Amino acid sequence: MANTEIKSGADNAQKIRDTRDLKIEQAVELALEDGVFSREELKALQERFHDDRFNIDHNNFREQQNLAESFKSERLLLKAKIDQTNDSDLKGRAQDRFSPNLQASDLSDTRASSDTLPQGFSLHRGAKKDDPKDFNFFWTDEDGKNAKEGTGSNITGMKQEKVFNKGKSSAALDFKYSTLDGILAEWVFGTVFGSESNKSIVLDVTMGSNLAQFLTTLGYKIDRDQRVKVTGEHFRKTADYLFTSGKVTETISQNSLGATYQLKLHDKREVLDYFEASGYITQSQGKELADKDFTIDTATLFELYRNKRNIAGGTKTGASLALGLTPWENGKFKITLGAENLKFKTIHSGDKYDKQGMTAKAEYSHDITKDLMAKISAATSTTEKCVLALELAFKLKPNLQLVLRGEHIERYSSFGLADTSEERGSIALRWTFATPEDQKKIDESARLWKAGAGKRNENKARETFRQMPQQAKDDFLEWSLSPAYKSTSVIAAVDENTRRLILLDKLLLPNASIDSQGNITEALPNSDVSGISGVTLNGAPYSNNNNFGLSGGNIVIYTGTLREPAVGTTDTYRVTIDENGGGQTIATITVQHGSVKVTSITFDRIPAPNQLPPTMGNVPNQTATVGTPITAINLASYITLTNGDAVTQYTLASGALPPGLTFNTTTGAITGTPTTAGTYNITVTATDNDGASNADAIQFVIAAAPANNPPVPTYTTFTMNEDTVKNGTLTATDA
């Protein structure tokens, strides 16, 4: 590349933009072939590598010189370190950073290389001279060339400071709004630590009125190409669950553990970035709820059901493989495919909800500009039908980002959740910074460099320090910030069994009233009762354990306490009720299979012993004429009471009254105007409060109304002459 003939700065700039495998060091060498950076070359370098060092005035010779020197020093330092170590990982990073053809230079002695370093910087072996990895960089307040006079890790008479691999940290504060969970706040803190910056820890806490989520992720960088992370999670979420008996709001907890292994790939075309393998297990705790009864009450039916309720927890296990790609500049694509097994711990539903299936996720991110990144993703699993997300990240400062994110989550409705669709929106600020301890080292190193570098200012020194190759930024922390597994919902399903307890056909019980529990109340023929003296079931004595009761003059049937008959059978209960007058009422209740299905209630009266019925005298037969009101017949006047028992009811036992007449069953009065001629025979019954009764027959003979003929006039015959007038009166009278 360095021997390529360069015609102009514009040609170099175009090559910097178009050459696919060009490294940053090669691009700088290309731009400097004519000795200076042109405006076009600086712009191309900035656009290609997004490196703030290229933001200089191309007419400022000192800035040009400092920029060229920084790349020269950077290259020499890396070459020197390669010469002094057999660390293949270090050499591999150097190859990636600069050129595949980069080899050890002639700088075989570290101390000799110090003459080529910027002022204030020196290289030394550590105390263990035989250990090729014990190789350290030092800042010093003396001129760098004097460092070669010292040996080991201590340089006599010189003030020095060891430069450690800089730890890096990130913190983010995220405010979210969810259509299901309301306002949420998330705080994330992560840091890289260890002498080789190969360990990381990330804490992630999300809190809201309906949700609490805690994650801890530990990362470890095995070498430059391999790394692993493990995430532990505790998640609590309050949601609505739809049971047959109604909606229930409950909080369910679950714990998860996930792990991810990543292997970086080295594709010559730089299309394949990395390969990932992940696995996870998550388990939720179910919650058994109390049984709940509910009714369905219509004009013709009453039904009582019992709903046995449980929110089933479960276990989800899964594994996936992912491939990261860079199909074009500034664009990254990640595709993940996996398999998942979901199993619930149900009590009533068996394996209704268990399922196995594939999982998939596609994610694409693109650097629109150096300060704006967009990311879009789509995913599906056994619990979420789809998860769609769009994210925009704005770089406000080099270490400060504003992140906007929107999500749509569609869950499967088969699990009994009241709400299966959710939208989320969030706004977050993310800071990236050094830890306080590392920042102190950075500041001290910059101060020492400033002291030795003379005109270089402290900020420039600090920035150059951060950009040294051994401190080169990588994405280990960024990778660790994304957990190996994170739940979007709890594993929970409605687990229930619903059984009908009572079925009442209101058409079969026309005189009964039914309360909200299915208890039946019906009036007794005689309300003057003293209590229940016995119950039989299918002819055998039966213990009345609050199955039947009395309330005033009514019998109460507690249907919820009755047993359900066997299939194809009918239970018959006979309840004996004692009356105060000495008689009894027998209530017969029939119950069929199909829950407790009460199909009939009938009553029989048994008069008290030696209790005579009322005497009914001979009610005379009646004659009447159509259209003429009859003389009222008062049956009570023909009754002689016995035993002091009053008549409580009159009944038309047989026959039918002549049309136009009415019968009062309380007073025994028959009144009205007949409308149809004919002979009518009826039987009436009088019943006293002991249930004793007597009857008598009555005949009604209804005559037709007489004919109503027009009047016939009468007159006298007479004669008269022509042309004369005769006056007289004509009279007609109706009979």
Image: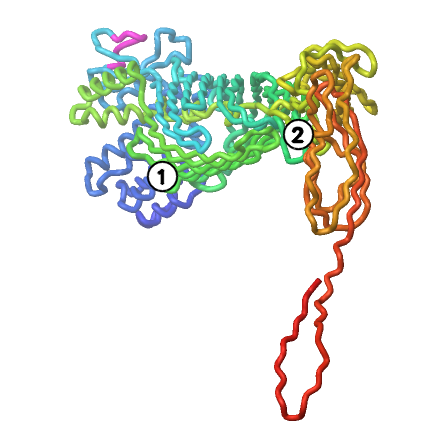
SS under mark 2: strand
Task: Single out the mark in the foreground, 1 or 2.
Answer: 2
Magenta region includes residue 41: no
Q: Is residue 717 visible?
A: yes
Residue at image position (70%, 49%) is: 628
State the residue at coordinates (38%, 46%): 15
On the question of residue 325 being in view, the answer is no
Q: Which residues are magenta?
A: 147-155
| Residue 144 percent location from the top left of the image | 24, 18
Q: Quadrant of the N terminus?
A: top left
Q: Which mark is residue 432?
A: none
Please state, as top left, top right, bottom left or bottom right, where the C terminus lies in the image: bottom right
Query: Disc 2 residue type?
Result: Phe
Instruction: Give the residue number, with chain letter if any, for mark 2.
Output: 302
Q: In the rendered structure, which disc, 1 or 2, sits on the residue that comes first in sequence?
A: 2
Q: Quadrant of residue 452?
A: top left
Left or right: residue 263 compared with residue 400: right
Residue nearest the observer in this picture, 509 or 58? 509
Which residue extends farthest bottom? Answer: 723
- The amino acid at mark 1 is Leu
Q: Nearer the viewer, residue 166 or 696?
A: 696
Please, what is the dominant secondary structure of the magenta stretch?
A: loop
Residue under numbered circle 1: 372
How is the rendered protein coloured? rainbow
